[in-house]
Each structure stands twice: as structure tokens, then as C-alpha cells.
Image: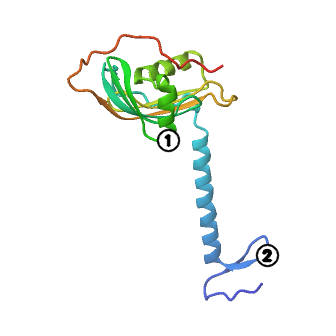
């Protein structure tokens, strides 16, 4: 293929027999170099030593569950699915309001399955002690959890759980002493 060369710019022929000016060859080389660098960076990031089952954001401070508080729970589990407004008084779930169709139905049928934040943390601790494949948590600056992800066996279906905690507010004027430790209810390892 003949290419009209601008004066003073040499022509280059690539291995496939395509002739181009040095300016076009330089642009192709630069594009290839940028692509290679991007792929190299992406590959390095993929080689990270943190596994999916061990990633966790540590709380910045120690959080102790107050006796009374409210929070919004978005739950994606086999047993409990939906978004719930939860009021905890004297360490127990006192009121639950379903905020979507699924959760409204479940409040009627499975109200006892809606946990306190402390019960969610006990479930996380249990999953870790039983070497669950995934037992991760992210925490707010005050130390309360904002997301808990569990999967006892990555090769099993329907044992995963994802809890998102938002709108957490301790109840003013109530005793702020932490709760005594009590066994978790309704959150045992799936068989």
C-alpha cells in the first residue's frame, strides 16, 4: 500500500504489510503501552492477599449496645427479607414496622425473628467461631455495625445472610448502660 508521506516524515511498514507514517505508528505504540500498563495495574490489584471471606472494616471505637434504641434493618436472608423499622426497649425488640410489602407480611408471621443489633453481633461471632466461609462486618465511627454479611458454606445455597443497619439512634432519657450478655434467639446456623 502506498502512502503519501508528508515531507520529512518517514513511512513505516508493520508486520502485516500496512504502511503508515511514523506519526501514526507512534500513536499506535503509545496506545498499546497505555493499555499494557492498565492491564498490569489491574492484574496486580487482583493478586491481593485479602480473601473475600476475611475482609472487614474494624470499628474505630468500642460500641456497647444500649438498653434502648431504634434502627432500620434491611435483611436479605432465607428467613427474614425486607426493610424493618425496629424499636428496642430494655434490651428486647419492642416494636417492628415493615417498610415494604415483604417486611409487612413478615412482621405478622415472623416478628420474633427480627433481631436486636446485639443479636446480629452474636450471630456474626458464632459464624466466625464456626469458621463460616464469610463472616464480614463494616462499622460506623461509633463502633456499631452498619453491614453484616454471612455465608456458612459458599457451596450451599440459601444459607447466606446480608444485614444492613441504618438510622441507628440510641433512645434519649433511657438507661444507657450496656445490656447483659444473653443468648441469641432465632439465629442458629442453618442445617
Q: Which quarter of the figure is the N terminus placed in?
A: bottom right
Percent coordinates x, y for residue 5 in the rendering? 66, 87
Q: Nearer the viewer, mark 1 or mark 2?
A: 1
Q: Residues within 10 Å of mark 2 (few under 14, many from 20)?
A: few
Q: Residue at x 57, y 49 (%)?
A: 41
Q: Is residue 4 above or below residue 169?
A: below
Question: Which labelled disc corresponds to residue 180?
Answer: none
Q: Is residue 89 above or below residue 84?
A: above
Task: Say which element carries label 2.
Answer: loop
Image quadrant in which you'd find residue 135: top right
- Count the numbered circles shown: 2
Image quadrant in which you'd find residue 38: bottom right
Q: Residue at x 33, y 25 (%)?
A: 61
Q: Which quarter of the figure is the C terminus placed in?
A: top right
The residue identified by callout 2 is 17
Whole-angstrom CA distance, mark 1 to mark 2, is 66 Å
The residue identified by callout 1 is 101
Percent coordinates x, y for residue 131 in the rendering? 60, 19
Task: Say which element carries label 1.
Answer: helix
**Left or right position of 115 against 190:** left
Is residue 148 shown to the viewer in this render? no
Q: Residues within 10 Å of mark 1 (few under 14, many from 20)?
A: few
Q: Is residue 167 above or below residue 89?
A: below
Percent coordinates x, y for residue 190 in the rendering? 62, 21
Q: Is residue 120 above or below residue 26?
A: above
Is residue 27 shown to the viewer in this render? yes
Amino acid at each position: 500500500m502506498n502512502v503519501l508521506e508528508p515531507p520529512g516524515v518517514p513511512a513505516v511498514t508493520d508486520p502485516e504489510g500496512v504502511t503508515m507514517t511514523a506519526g501514526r505508528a507512534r500513536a499506535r505504540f503509545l496506545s498499546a503501552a497505555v493499555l499494557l500498563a492498565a492491564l498490569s495495574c489491574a492484574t496486580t490489584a487482583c493478586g491481593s492477599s485479602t480473601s473475600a471471606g476475611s475482609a472487614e472494616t474494624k470499628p474505630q471505637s468500642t460500641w456497647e449496645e444500649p438498653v434502648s434504641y431504634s434502627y432500620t434493618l434491611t435483611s436479605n436472608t432465607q428467613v427474614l427479607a425486607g426493610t424493618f423499622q425496629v424499636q428496642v426497649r430494655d434490651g428486647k425488640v419492642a416494636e417492628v414496622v415493615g417498610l415494604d410489602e415483604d417486611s409487612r407480611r413478615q412482621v405478622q408471621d415472623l416478628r420474633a425473628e427480627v433481631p436486636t443489633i446485639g443479636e446480629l453481633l452474636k450471630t456474626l461471632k458464632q459464624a466466625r467461631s464456626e469458621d463460616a466461609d464469610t463472616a464480614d462486618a463494616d462499622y460506623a465511627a461509633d463502633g456499631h455495625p452498619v453491614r453484616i454479611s454471612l455465608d456458612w458454606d459458599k457451596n450451599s445455597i440459601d444459607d447466606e445472610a446480608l444485614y444492613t443497619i441504618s438510622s441507628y439512634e440510641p433512645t434519649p432519657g433511657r438507661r444507657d448502660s450496656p445490656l447483659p450478655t444473653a443468648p441469641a434467639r432465632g439465629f442458629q446456623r442453618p442445617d
